[in-house]
Image: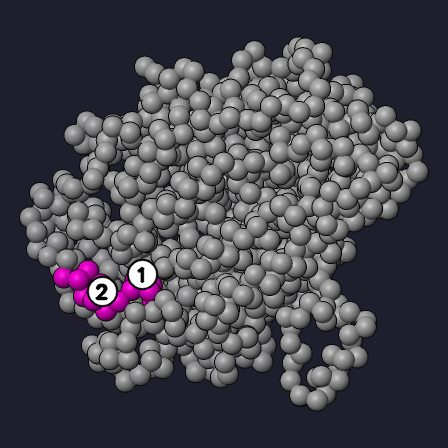
Amino acid sequence: MRNTQDTQSIFELSKPGRRAARLPECDVPECSLRELLPAKMVADAPPALPELSEPAIVRHFVNLSTLNMSVDTHFYPLGSCTMKYNPKRNERAAAMPGFADLHPYQPEDTLQGMLQMLYEMQETLQEISGLDACSLQPAAGAHGELTALLVAAAYFRDIGEVRTKVLVPDNAHGTNPASAAMAGFESVTVKTTVDGFVDLSDLAAKLDDQVAVFMITNPSTLGLFEPNMRTVADEVHAHGGLIYLDGANMNAILGITRPGDWSPGKGGADMQHYNPHKTFSGPHGGGGPGAGPICVTKKLAPYLPVPVVVREARVARREALENDVKDNNSRPAPHDSQLFRYSLDFDQPKTIGRVRAFFGNVGVLLRAYAYIRTHGPDGLRRVSENAVLNANYLLSRVAHFLPVPQGRRCMHEFVASASQLKRDKNIAAMDIAKRLLDYGYHAPTVYFPLTVPEAMMIEPTESESKETLDAFTEVLFRITEEDADLLHDAPHTTAVSRPDEVRAARQPVLTYSAE
Amino acid sequence: MPYLYNTPEDQQAMLEAIGVESMDELFDPIPAELQLDRPLDLPPAMSEMELDKHLSTLAAKNRHAGQVVCFLGGGCYDHFVPAVVDAVASRSEFYTSYTPYQAEASQGNLQVVFEYQSMISRLSGMDVSNASLYDGASAAAEAVLMAITATRRHGKIVVAGSVHPEYRTTIATYLENLETDLVTVDTPGGVIDPDLLAAAIDDTTAAVVLQQPNFFGCLEDGHRVAQIAKDAGALLITAFDPISLGILARPGDYGTNIAVAEGHSLGTPMSYGGPFLGIMACDQNLVRRMPGRIAGHTVDRHGNPCYVLTMQTREQHIRREKATSNVCTNQGLFALRATVYLAQLGPQGLRETANLCLQKSLYAAEQLVAHDRFSLAFEAPTFKEFVIRDAENDVEGLLKTAQQNGILAGVPLGQWYPELADCFLVAVTEKRTKDEIDSLVSSLTNSSTPVHAPV
């Protein structure tokens, strides 16, 4: 039941003198602030925070939570965001005090379980990408992009080459050109063809010895695998450049193909990031946290941020380990802390340094680790197969009434266009998106990629059922048949209707004030 | 597979509807020579029970703050997290939702962000806050980039040596491929020397970066530093400790232009250093140069008050290479945690928490320096952390002994400051009791009785 009483501003619920927290008595001899600190360093009064009781706080925030759509309550086919189920077992694991209550500067001998998990995560991400080294430090996908571009810049500086440009296809995520600019490169746009693939002649025209990196999203933001991937990689490499894979769409290719293998015999992608909060089921948290670990080839490894986790065999056990390998002709069990000691390696003279404090977004990585261990190699492949199956199934049904300009088939997502509806009935992609909310579905990503007019980017993920996809298709079809005015005013059933965004931007009100 | 719905019959029906024979055929668009011809070389799948056991085993190989007494600081602290914070943050309508781009279906998240922004600006004494960044260090680096574009000064950034070394490295990394130099002003006295600072600044300096309290726990003269920066036409960036603002003057009070912070202390556990909460707040006239998401108050088409993400023309998904930053993700869930935490504490609770940190840390420092072996490395007043110098220059041995007594006594400083190789940093939060502090002292002075099992 909706309760609007307690969802008013928390500052309006405040009353002077109300309190929730009670702190322990000070058990050491207490001195007055005036004796301890210079007067000008002390605030005149404590900050003007709201004053509430604990039940009021809980009621306020719990009622606010009910104003959200979420993966746990609704189908959330938001393209490019991979809104899959967030397993509860991962949440429980991340909350274990043995992981949650660790200080980053604890001695390594009190962190062996944590370091083992992180070491295995590095190895796992390298294996999935077909690359040689890994940094778990970046805090989000875009942060991984920036980190990798700084690694590339350090590499070229080190080998004495001056390269100033980064090439980005016109259908790339906005983070790509923004990361390039932030890393000090000039971002140059490469066209894509009408089919949605890299325009090889435009690439050839823009490739020169000034190009440091070509950033590619593959599968692309159109949900298509780049058919000329090998040629693109070879061309860029022939000019001395590096290939960066934007790993936002890894959910389509786990165990199917590896970016590091995309030019057989010669390598492939040189760098990539992962979005563990997409591919490996980390909850999106209403906007974060995410994580953005990157993998790179051997020649780029010396430039990665520090520290990385390394391990060494414990001397006393090394012999047993070697015998074990001989006897079984198999890999040693990599998870036995009796055999290995894990430590942080800061000794990388060519490192770019750091992109944040402490080790990384460990809590997100732990959930990803739990997800990967739950699936194993076959399970990860099943994930991608079913993500691609669900997307193609939805595409095959939706394409009957909403054109999908690029392709009869897709990988993990596809981009439909409402441009015909816009022309014929004045129904825009945004109208459909808003009307879907009325029917209890989150909207697809709209107006992206920019290369498709009235774009609606739909990604169902593998954790949805055929029944859900069928029901969604029927609703989507019904909406396209509805009266245009009804859609222009949509949504009708949500807590609020369309916000006045122009007013929000022109007369910004960004903090609460009583007036 | 635990999280898949499709039955074999479903899959068959779907393949037929698509018009393909098999799952493999779905991947025909990937050239055959690029496809992996073997399974991934990863350990086999685990059931939930096996996973739980495996992770519990890994967790048991760590010693956590419930098993040892933690006096470690340096930007991450063992503060108390009230149960209310966990209860609210575990609402899956919060943690399984995405960025509130569809405002009508995200009013909960948007209002939380708006309340977060409001509380952070009141806490810091700044005009406006964004919806959060990755962590304190990357927020400081973003502030530096923001200052460069705002001042159009590309010459240099001046940072105090008393700023967290990892924050300084992060800023240096962000600047590495840009034309701006990072100049560090040494702080041998533990705080900024105004003359040294003034000498380092010139008319190409975009910003001065200050930490308050600084990495050594010492209080800087914020007013003085702000004046020096202002006189040179540079902006002041202050990295603050949110808990300290229950007592200390707010960054906005002494002329900070961009305030940043590591916000994990506001209700997020230490989690081995992440994910954390990057706080950023600034002067009104800088808001359109701010990185990251910002929520605003507006009305809907019926005139009802509501919230929406605003000023998005700053951001990468609109402006691409001309955006103020590449930042997309914020730390929504931890902004929520901070909001609930600040509401739970309220003004008095935050003041009392800060006071406990202050009183207990001063008690700990006094007890330690009562022994000849120990002295305070710096004279400046401190808040909840302080640097102890060991006259016998055996920091490693001391910390190891304490660890054997179940105490993580401090962070050795030699790794960042070779001249402080005989020093360590001790942090005392509101959670530490007099007994624990007394045990710290006795374990460091060889008169110890273990309070906990050996680590």
Secondary-structure class at tag 1:
loop
Residue A122 forms part of the magenta stretch = no
Horizontal side, residue B361 vs residue B316: left or right: right
**Which x, y percent locates residue A198?**
41, 65
Query: What's the residue type where badge 2 is placed?
Result: Leu
Direction from residue A351 to residue B371 in the image, left or right: right
Let me know if marks 1 and 2 both belong to one chain. Answer: yes
Residue at left 53%, top 17%? A46
Q: Position of residue B170 (x, y in %)?
A: 65, 43
- Look at mark 2 in the image and give the residue it sits on: A469
Which one is in front, B68 or B39?
B68
Q: Is residue A150 left or right of residue A508?
A: right
Residue carrying label 1: A459
Residue B204 lies, with reference to residue A85, above or below; the image says above
Badge 1 crowding class, 10 Å Cα cut-off, few under 14, some 14 to 19, many 20 or more, is many
Q: Residue A467: within the magenta?
A: yes
> Residue A408's quadrant in the figure?
bottom left
Q: How is the image coloured?
A: one colour
First in sequence, mark 1 or 2: give its number: 1
Q: Give the range drawn in magenta.
A: A459-474
